[in-house]
Image (cartoon, rainbow, N blue to C red):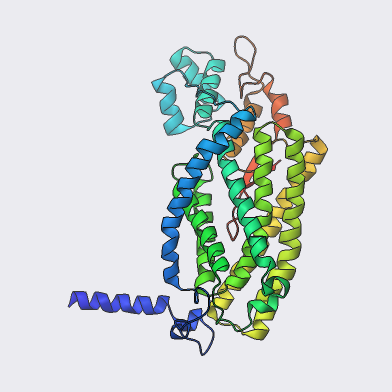
Amino acid sequence: MATTAAAGALGLLWGWLWSERFWLPQNVSWADLEGPADGYGYPRARHMLSVFPLAAGVFSVRLLFERFIAKPCALHAGIEDSVLYRVESNDTLEKVFVSITKYPDERRLEGLAKQLDWDVRKIQCWFRHRRNQDKPPTLTKFCESMWRFTFYLCVFCYGIRFLWLTPWFWDTRQCWQSYPYQPLSRELYYYYIMELAFYWSLMFSQFIDVKRKDFLIMFVHHLATIGLITFSYINNMVRVGTLVMCLHDSSDFLLEAAKLANYAKCQRLCDTLFVIFSAVFMVTRLGIYPMWILNTTLFESWEMIGPYPSWWLFNGLLLTLQVLHVIWSYLIARIAFKALIRGKVSKDDRSDVESSSEEEDETTHTNKLSGRSSSNGANCVNGHMGGSRWAEERGTCTAVGNPLFGASPHLQSCD
């Protein structure tokens, strides 16, 4: 009896989840999309199952790439495979670091100094080195960025090459011609599946990669990206989906290239790449996206197929993305403006590790503690003497992410 009731409840849930009234236009059923079609047939939810072994393959390729290609390139660029410096073991300070705060204030520093019979400067240095102990070496960051740069560049080139030969690239009304009876081509199927597999691989690797302050944000980011790509695939909005993915991929590899230049200490190249990235980002997000993508999804599709429930949801998500584009463009413009004033981009312009948030806190603590000196009159904050002046020149960094189609430029606004 209970089994029958549970089966009935699951049947109702399944029917609600795959409701034709929600997913499909009027007078179209799932059975209509089961029939024969050219190419790979019509998109079906079961196609998504092939993504998981492919994502595992992508992750394996990444490990090999970082080991045998990225690491030698990093060493050739002069990035050392540095040995991790471990701080002096101290149970009292470790307990404070793990359980209370990584950034003790002046009052706590004085209390610890009395308790341990250390001077304040030595305790400040211990906490600084302990924070740095958890940070990844530049070599690791370079390898991760080089993998992302390579993938983003390759998938963007593939997307441009594929779309160049499609009719909807030149006439967006073709995105809705005969919708939803638009069979998949082999190239389109590969494009979608590879993008989705890459983001699933990022989901897997996030738990073993460099631990970031924005771990939860990035987790939600990857889920949102996977959800949107999957949604557009099941709903067979793949034609306009390819346009959105390619548009967003157009700037991601430039940001990763700027990071690589930054890690290799090629400041002029880093600045140049960041300026190019900023221009491409704003042109594509604030110009092409609303005039090309939103125009066809909101107006041309309304005229040709009319609205239905999943159409409203899809456009709502795309409009939300446009709002985020405006916010990100403002933050990028601030970075570029300050870079022009200072003559350089002062920090890695992507929230690559937790240092973006930690350095913000360290700067704050530097300002608070800069007036205090130990018995020898020196401040040891972030390894610099005269911390107040240094703190004024550094600036703080706030991480933001791009949670929808086409990856994730994580930018830092350096205030």
Q: Is residue 348 visible?
A: no
The residue positioned 51% from the left and 90% from the top of the image is 27
| Side of 193 where 378 appears, left or right | right
Q: Residue furthest left?
A: 1
Quadrant in the picture for residue 356 = top right
Vertical placement of residue 198 versus 343, above or below: below
The residue positioned 53% from the left and 39% from the top of the image is 66
Can you give x and y, in whole percent of width and height, for residue 12 in the image? 34, 79
The residue positioned 51% from the left and 23% from the top of the image is 83
Quadrant in the picture for residue 79 = top right
Vertical placement of residue 157 versus 186, above or below: above
| Side of 23 where 303 appears, left or right | right
Give the quadrant of the C terminus. Answer: top right
The residue positioned 57% from the left and 16% from the top of the image is 121
Give the quadrant of the N terminus. Answer: bottom left
Vertical placement of residue 116 versus 183, above or below: above
Name the one closer to the observer, 361 or 21: 21
| Side of 355 where 257 appears, left or right | right
Can you give x and y, in whole percent of width and height, for residue 199 in the image? 51, 55
Vertical placement of residue 128 versus 311, above or below: above
Name the one closer to the observer, 85 or 57: 57
Can you give x and y, in whole percent of width and height, for residue 282 in the image? 75, 56
